[in-house]
Image (cartoon, helix red, strand yellow):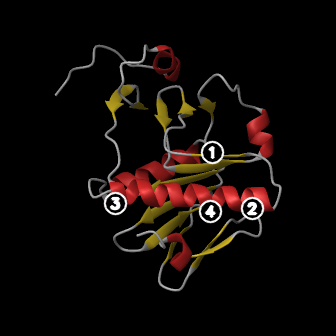
Amino acid sequence: MAVQDRLYTAQDLENMPDDGKVYELHNGVLIEVAGSKYRQTRLAAWIVYLLTAFVEEHELGGAVTGADGTFVLNRYNTRFPDAAYITQQTALDQDEDSFMRGAPDLAVEVVSPSNPPQDMQQRAGEYLAAGAKLVWIVDPEARTVDVYRPDGSRTVVSGDGALDGGDVLPGLRLPLAMVFKPV
């Protein structure tokens, strides 16, 4: 286990030379993040596609990002969700040559076998505390999606259920059969 000599900030992370590794910050600690397995990355790419198709079809503007988009949640915490959407207004507030500031409006995390449920709940809470309006935790094994909202509510969508975009992506309705089509 490596010992870290100081707390790192999001600015420190952004200014680090590229060493070929991927890092997130958690409470100022640099954490090297492993790549995703085939199932998870394929599902995340599919969700990016579904979100992008909806945003384009409805001319919503904003931006859909994939698993390598770093969001600065606060000075000592960064995350890169597997998929995310930021509204046009949020996109206007971004510097295209920097990490994205603040949480995405919709953050999507695809559960890997190494992700304990409490870690995923913590991630959802971090996104919401930083201003996310909707968080989806997608579990390909259970074929469920936990939906978290800023009011503290959590809904588990399963079976014949469907995801909706709420206030973030009004009109979006994704049946789980469509979401889990590639797995």
Amino acid beneath label 3: Pro
Number of other residues with Cα within 10 Å of mark 1, as a class: few under 14, some 14 to 19, many 20 or more: many
The label nearer to you, 3 versus 4, is 4
* Front position in the image: 85 or 29: 85
Amino acid beneath label 1: Pro
> Mark 3 to mark 1: distance in Å?
21 Å
Look at the numbered disc 3 and give the secondary structure of its residue: helix
Residue labelled with disc 3: 117
Number of other residues with Cα within 10 Å of mark 2, as a class: few under 14, some 14 to 19, many 20 or more: few
Residue labelled with disc 4: 50
> Mark 3 to mark 4: distance in Å?
25 Å
Look at the numbered disc 2 and give the secondary structure of its residue: loop
Residue 20 lies left or right of residue 59; in this view the side is: left
| Mark 3 vs 2, N-terminal side | 3
> Mark 3 to mark 2: distance in Å?
26 Å
Q: Which mark is residue 12?
A: none
Residue lying at 60% horizontally and 58% vertically, measured from the top left: 49
Residue labelled with disc 1: 104
Furthest residue toward bottom: 160
Amino acid beneath label 4: Leu
* Front position in the image: 119 or 48: 48
Residue 99: give x, y in percent of width and height: 59, 28
| Mark 3 vs 1, N-terminal side | 1
Residue 45 lies left or right of residue 141; in this view the side is: right
Amino acid beneath label 2: Asp
| Mark 2 vs 4, N-terminal side | 4
> Mark 1 to mark 2: distance in Å?
13 Å
